Structures are given as C-alpha cells and as structure tokens.
Image (cartoon, rainbow, N blue to C red):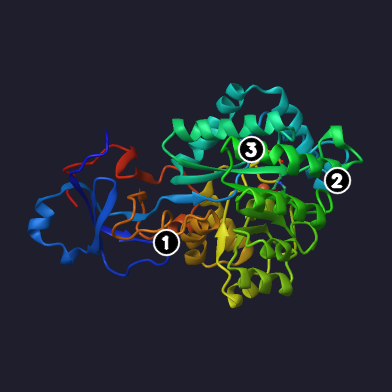
Amino acid sequence: MGASAARKLWDRVTVFDGSRTWPEAMALVTGGERIERLVRVAELGPDERASCELMAGGGVITPGLVDCHTHLVFAGQRAAEFEQRLKGVSYAAIAAAGGGILSTVRATRAASEDELVEQTRPRLEALIADGVTTVEIKSGYGLSQNDELKMLRAARRLGAELPVRVLTTFLGAHALPPEFVGRPDAYIDEICKRMLPAVAEAGLADAVDVFCEHIAFTPAQCERVFEAATRLGLPVKIHAEQLSNQHGSALAARFGALSADHLEWLDEAGVAAMAEAGMVATLLPGAFLTLKETRLPPIQALRDAGVPMAVASDGNPGSSPMFQLTLMLNLACTLFGLTPTEALQGITRNAARALGLQGQAGELAEGRQADFCLWRIENPVELAYAVQSGRLRQRVVAGRITHGAPESGVSP
Ligand code: NIG
Ligand code: FE
C-alpha cells in the first residue's frame, strides 16, 4: 500500500474543504501524495475520469482532522478523582491536596518510555479511528528534565509508528513539582536555564506552553518561560483564563503566541490583544463539561473581532478524559453555541493554524498534501449532530489509504 503515482478518484462526494461545504457534488483526484483536482463532477472530463482508479463514490470528504491541544502521553488514570468531583470536590481542591496533575506526574515518572508508548498508543489509535491525521501532544507530567524528555520522546516515537503527524509541545510549566514546593521561581529558573535548553538541543519540541492560573503559574513566571522560549526560537502558546482571569492571553499576545487555550474568563481587552496579534482561540469544551464550568468563553466577542476559533479535545486524564475529536464538534455547538461550520473549521483549518501549519494541513485544495477523510454520511453537519463512532470509511494520508479498504472499482 505504498504511495502510488497513479491518479485516484473519489467521485460524487460532498466536500467540506476546511472553510465551507461546496454546494455541488465534487470529484477529488489525487496524484501520488498530492491533491491534483478538486472540481465539480460535471467539470471532470471523461478522459480524465478514465485515467483514474476509482476509489469510492458518494459520501462526505473533509480534511484530515487536526487535534491541536492534547495531553495524550501519560501513565495511569484518575477515575477516583472523577468520583470525588461527582461528590462535589472541586478540581482546584483536588490539586491543592496533591492530587490532580501531580497524581499523574507520580505515575508518569514511574513509567518507562516504553510503558508510556504502550499506554498512549490506544488513545492515539482512538483519535486516528475518528479521522485525526495531525495531533499536538504536550509534555507536562514529568516536571523534571529527564521525565519531560521521556514524554516528548514517547510522543515522537508514536508519530513515527502510527500514520499520524505528531507535533510536540514542551509544557514544563504545567504544575509545581514536589521538589520545588514553596520555590516556584526556582522551578521557573530550572525550566529556563536547564530544561528548555535541553529540550531545544534535543530537537524534541515544536512549541512551548505554560499553565497561567492561580493553581499553577503567575503571568510574571509565564513571561520568563516565554522569554526563554523566544530566545531559543520556539513559538509559544498558553493555557489561559480557564478558572480565573489572569490576563494570560494578552501576555501571550505580546510574544506573538500561536494560540491561547480554554478562555472561559477572557475579557474584551484579551480578545482585542489576541485579534491584534493574529492568535487563534482554542476552545476546549471537554474540559468545560468535565469540570462542570458555567462561565462560557466570549464566543460572540471572538467572532466580532475576527479571532479564528479552533476546537480541540484537551485529551488528558483529569479535566478532559475524552479521546474523540468529533465529540468536541457536538460539545462546541451545544455548550458554546458555535455553528456546525464554525466547529468544523475549528478542527480543520483553524486547528492547523493554531499549530503554525496553515496551508499545510486542515484544508483541501489543489496542490496540497492529500490528507483527508471519507465519511459514511450525507452532510458534514452530521459529524457535529450525532455522537457516533464507525463513520470513517477511509482515511488518506499523503495519498495513502491508512484506514478502510481501497474501494477500487466500486461504482458511484
Ligand atoms: O488543559 N489546565 C491544565 N491542564 C490540563 C489538565 C491536566 C490534568 O488535569 O491532568 C487542561 O485542562
Ligand atoms: Fe490542556
């Protein structure tokens, strides 16, 4: 099943191209790794059609999905905390008692790199089976140089093993490790002077993230991490305004950040700063649902300011134990009031932009790498409307079918 130079045709398909759903039935032709033609069915001449191998007829084609914010690499699970939260104990109270992120840190430190790969693989396979072709994976459960490097290597190994593009993000400033209790600035020193340079030296991170929150790091501490990342030439992003307004998004805007993520407490000044800096607002409805938040991100203000909105799973063992990106479409619509088209843009074109991959992923256009999904549905809105697995008929990465049988000869 290697990449073939032969032209392949997906005929009479409904296409959502990352921005909009085309009103007419379309034909999509690949040549090797690229999309060669994306045309209305009537415009594909008979000779052209005859020169193609027919892959499928009918169905919906979307770009390969992009999950631009995950914490997929971790060891263990936190079901007991789920039970505590159901009894009314808050996420912040669990964190203050040494649980939460720190309980996953203990399990992740105890795991070998091989064990992390093994434990993460089914979660990544679940995303892949749901149409994901590009995924961002953060560190942040190691919180020591060796354990953070171990997490990032595990993420990169999974990207080499499975048919998915993995981008890695260093999130050393996720929580204060036990060795540094009472000395958060010393831990920030450790990140800036030792951990981050080591990660950059090993070439293991595509970006740097921080958790700016009253239960994590202050804006001044996050700023120091951003300065160090910028000196090393790494792009930055931020977990901001999730539980309170720390003005983290505006801080990130000053560093030309790729995105600010969560944003339930984002204010108007923050929206304006993000618009000015051309940042993406990454919405994480799985965390909103899991933590039973009630304050909504300022969707209308983001729309009015023209800030592109991405939607991601935030897949992690605590605040969003959800490893199905299409579920986030439904939640973004029902909980946050996005339109289905906005939600679809959020897991395609805008998610790619949040990763600095605009023009390289999340969009279907002639000349682009052929990363797309063929779905057993009639209308792209169905992906947001119904929560259902098993709708993915084919998943194509760089022109290769990586899921589903090649359906050569199936008549449209
Ligand atoms: O994005 N907000 C901080 N970090 C994660 C939660 C990680 C965890 O609870 O393990 C998040 O929600
Ligand atoms: Fe997160």
Q: Is residue 140 in sight in this rendering?
A: no
Q: Is residue 160 in sight in this rendering?
A: yes
Q: Quadrant of ligand 1?
A: top right
Residue 376, relative to residue 17: is it above or below? above
Residue shown at 65% from the left, 42% from the top: 170
Q: Which residue is mark 3?
A: 199
Q: Which residue is mark 1?
A: 18
The amino acid type found where label 2 is placed reads Asp
Q: Name the side, left or right, on which 131 lies relative to 336.
A: left
In this view, the residue farthest toward the right is: 182
Q: Which residue is mark 2?
A: 185
The amino acid type found where label 3 is placed reads Val
The amino acid type found where label 1 is placed reads Gly
Q: Name the side, left or right, on which 86 lies relative to 16.
A: right
Q: CA distance from mark 3 to mark 2?
A: 20 Å
Observer-nearest of 334 and 243: 243
Q: Please say if the residues under marks 1 and 2 sit with CB atoms less than 8 Å apart.
A: no
